[in-house]
Image: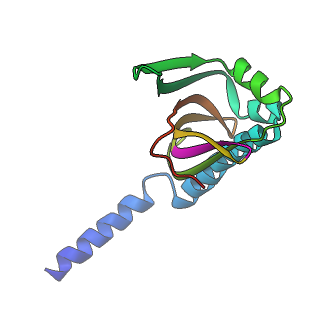
């Protein structure tokens, strides 16, 4: 039976080394994708719509899911242009979205990110939820093609 253990170890090694994507590639891509998110959230904090806009494809789809005051589920589509206008319109408040428990999945030139977040206006808690991003790599640049978020005020982790 010890031979069986060696066989499975060898088989695992073969599968890992021949799948065409190395762990280093995945790590490099994960870092690049995290940089996309950092640029977006830094741009939001800075009120820099150009920085925020640079991480999105122009035809991005954006949705927010939440419950209205009657408790009914609402799915609202938002436009990138409206989001960028809101970010870039001068405001004294700092929009600070803190993310945690982030999961990144990558297959070649597509990726998805699922992350929890808590949103603050200055240091005042506003809401929390999940951000779900889909990204595509074109000409070695990752850009967001879809963003969906949930929004709630209860069950939030406050930092």
**Which residue is located at x 74 percent, y 44 percent?**
122
Residue 56 picture location, percent across and down: 68, 30
In this image, 132 relative to 93: left or right?
left
Q: Is residue 57 above or below residue 129?
A: above
Quadrant the C terminus occupies: bottom right
Residue 38 among those drawn in magenta: no
**Which residue is located at x 71 percent, y 19 percent?**
82
**Magenta highlight: main SS:** strand
Image quarter of residue 84? top right
In this image, 112 relative to 98: left or right?
left
Question: 64 and 70: which one is in front?
Answer: 70
Stretch of the chain drawn in magenta = 115-122
Image quarter of residue 70? top left
Q: Is residue 87 above or below residue 112?
A: above
Residue 22 picture location, percent across and down: 52, 57
Residue 120 among those drawn in magenta: yes
Image quarter of residue 135? top right
**Which residue is located at x 56 percent, y 17 percent?**
77
Residue 51 picture location, percent across and down: 80, 36
């Amino acid at each position: 039976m010890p031979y069986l253990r060696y066989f499975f170890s060898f088989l695992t090694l073969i599968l890992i080394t021949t799948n065409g994507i190395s762990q280093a590639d995945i790590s490099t891509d994960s870092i690049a994708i995290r940089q996309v998110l950092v640029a977006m959230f830094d741009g939001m904090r800075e009120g820099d719509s150009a920085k925020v806009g640079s991480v999105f494809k122009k035809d991005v789809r954006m949705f927010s899911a939440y419950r209205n005051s009657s408790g009914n589920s609402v799915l609202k589509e938002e436009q990138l242009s409206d989001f960028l206008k809101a970010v870039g319109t001068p405001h004294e408040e700092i929009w600070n979205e803190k993310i945690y428990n982030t999961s990144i999945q990558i297959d070649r030139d597509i990726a998805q990110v699922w992350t929890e977040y808590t949103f603050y206006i200055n240091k005042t808690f506003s809401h929390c939820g999940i951000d779900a991003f889909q990204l595509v790599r074109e000409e070695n640049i990752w850009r967001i093609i879809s963003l969906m978020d949930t929004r709630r005020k209860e069950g939030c982790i406050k930092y």
